[in-house]
């Protein structure tokens, strides 16, 4: 049972979606789900935080509530009802798991992520607005707690909370599994400038930092 | 005579937290106060000595000054690590039990920690509400990949009436068994009221 089957059974045609997607750009629900699944896998396996997928997410959430609505008209004891509901729950899990993974990274590397985020211009922001706000509140919460319980009682030269050694950074050189989606010629792997040609469909273990641009451009998928 | 090392207490604080088998042990109010006092004492010694140095120009005390400064920083670092780890555990409470801290755990927290929990809870809630065009999505459910829509559960604690989404009301009495939609009762399982029966 795939999402497409669910939609067929519920008589949702792709034409219905035109109002869901951006004006001229048409995208099928199946494609949206695929994108989300890829983003989810990437996010889970990547040591750094990746650009957010708010648009995909909102399209998918719209789909879900749309389908939830349509399912009310189905007989509850119909086998299809159970299969559909199961599929929707799976999609919902992917969405929540994706967002949770991001929150976990934000909570762990708050200051690092905020600093990086401030250095990016508007088009290249990796956090959604809500995530940014969450990160700021989170950082604020920890600082004020530190201050209230300990730092305010310390001598002035020890009261700072912005020292470099207090920033937790992800290890960008940790190894990841990756699958090439397209042929990429001469990728530098390792410090000795060794080069490897990635063939579409091949799998590799490489330190993340060396291939981060391939992940961002969608040429490689983390697995 | 060997008396005691600087920053020993602060290090003990972390070790105790690590060793404790409670999820969040009692906040060590007294120890924290003593550490802060030690910090103050070391600092004052240093200030006094720095004054001596600048008056007399005697540089032989320099290493001692540096040593004390390192002790100060170690104290700070240990103390903050202690607080930070507690905050991390406190955040887990939000995901496990929802916005209300169970009373037996609450008794172990200090006032600022409870405030922190409430602020965190609020911030998380407003984030979850903002997802998907104001419709909101609860991230604290669906914690595991779904295997089946319904699960068989046994009630291990008296709970009373529980209303399902479709309006049906079930009575959760101790030791009763039910077949319920997973999504709606996931929180009860995590709180230890229901137990998932795995065949």
Image (cartoon, helix red, strand yellow):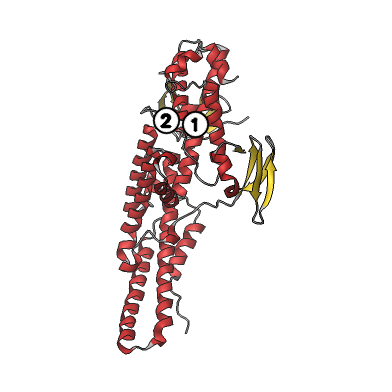
Res. B25 visible in picture: no
Q: Residue at x 32, y 89 (%)?
A: B56
B109 on left or right of A16: left
How many marks are shown on the rendered structure? Answer: 2
Horizontal side of B140 relative to A223 (left or right) equals: left
Q: CA distance from mark 1 to mark 2?
A: 9 Å
Q: Which mark is residue A95?
A: 1
Report the chain holding disc 2: B
| Residue B35 in which image quadrant | bottom left
Q: Where residue B43 sits: x, y (%)?
A: 34, 74
Percent position of residue A161, x then y: 37, 59
Tag 2, which secondary structure?
loop
A214 displayed left or right of B62? right
For the point 41% across and 49% down, the residue is: A119
Q: Nearer the viewer, residue A47 or B155?
A: A47
Residue shown at 33%/44% (left/top)? B119
Figure quadrant of the C terminus of chain B? top right
Residue at 45% in and 20% down: A24
Same chain assignment for discs 1 and 2:
no
Q: Is residue B58 above or below residue A102?
A: below
Residue A144: percent from the left, percent from the top?
Answer: 32, 54
Front-most of residues A77 and A115: A115
Label 2 belongs to which residue?
B137
Is disc 1 in contact with disc 2, using a CB cutoff of under 8 Å? yes
Chain letter, disc 1 residue? A
Local secondary structure at mark 1: helix
> Dot 1: within a 10 Å radius of its alpha carbon, few (fewer than 14), some, or many (20 or more) residues?
many
């Amino acid at each position: 049972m795939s999402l497409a089957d669910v939609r067929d059974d519920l008589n949702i045609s792709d034409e219905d979606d035109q109002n869901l997607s951006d004006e001229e750009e048409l995208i099928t629900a199946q494609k949206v789900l695929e994108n989300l699944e890829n983003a989810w896998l990437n996010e889970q396996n990547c040591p750094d935080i990746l650009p957010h997928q708010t648009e995909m997410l909102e399209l998918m959430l719209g789909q879900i509530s749309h389908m939830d609505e349509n399912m009310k008209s189905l007989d509850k004891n119909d086998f299809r009802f159970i299969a559909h509901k199961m599929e929707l729950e799976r999609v919902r899990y992917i969405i929540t798991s994706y967002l949770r993974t991001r929150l976990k990274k934000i909570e762990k590397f708050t200051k690092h992520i905020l600093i990086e985020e401030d250095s990016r211009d508007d088009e290249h922001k990796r956090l959604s607005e809500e995530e940014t706000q969450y990160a700021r509140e989170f950082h604020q919460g920890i600082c004020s707690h530190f201050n209230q319980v300990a730092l305010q009682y310390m001598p002035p030269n020890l009261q700072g909370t912005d020292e470099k050694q207090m920033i937790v950074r992800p290890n960008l050189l940790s190894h990841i599994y990756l699958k090439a989606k397209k042929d990429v010629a001469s990728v530098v792997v390792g410090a000795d400038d060794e080069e490897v040609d990635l063939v579409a469909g091949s799998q590799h273990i490489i330190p993340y930092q060396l291939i981060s641009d391939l992940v961002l451009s969608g040429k490689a998928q983390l697995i | 005579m060997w008396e005691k090392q600087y920053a020993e207490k602060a290090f003990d604080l972390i070790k105790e937290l690590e060793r404790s088998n409670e999820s969040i042990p009692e906040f060590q109010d007294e120890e924290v106060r003593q550490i802060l006092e030690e910090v103050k004492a070391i600092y004052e010694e240093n200030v006094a000595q720095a004054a001596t140095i600048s008056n007399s120009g005697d540089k032989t005390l320099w290493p001692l000054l540096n040593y004390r400064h390192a002790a100060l920083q170690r104290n700070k670092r240990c103390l903050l690590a202690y607080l930070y780890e507690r905050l991390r555990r406190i955040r887990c409470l939000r995901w496990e039990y929802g916005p209300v801290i169970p009373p037996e755990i609450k008794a172990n927290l200090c006032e600022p920690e409870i405030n922190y929990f409430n602020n965190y809870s609020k911030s998380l809630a407003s984030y979850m509400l903002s997802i998907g065009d104001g419709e909101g999505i609860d991230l604290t459910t669906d914690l595991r990949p779904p295997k089946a829509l319904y699960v068989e559960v046994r009630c291990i604690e008296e709970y009373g009436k529980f209303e399902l989404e479709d309006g049906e009301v079930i009575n959760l009495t101790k030791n009763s068994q039910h077949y319920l939609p997973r999504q709606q009762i996931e929180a009860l399982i995590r709180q230890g009221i229901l137990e998932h029966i795995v065949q």
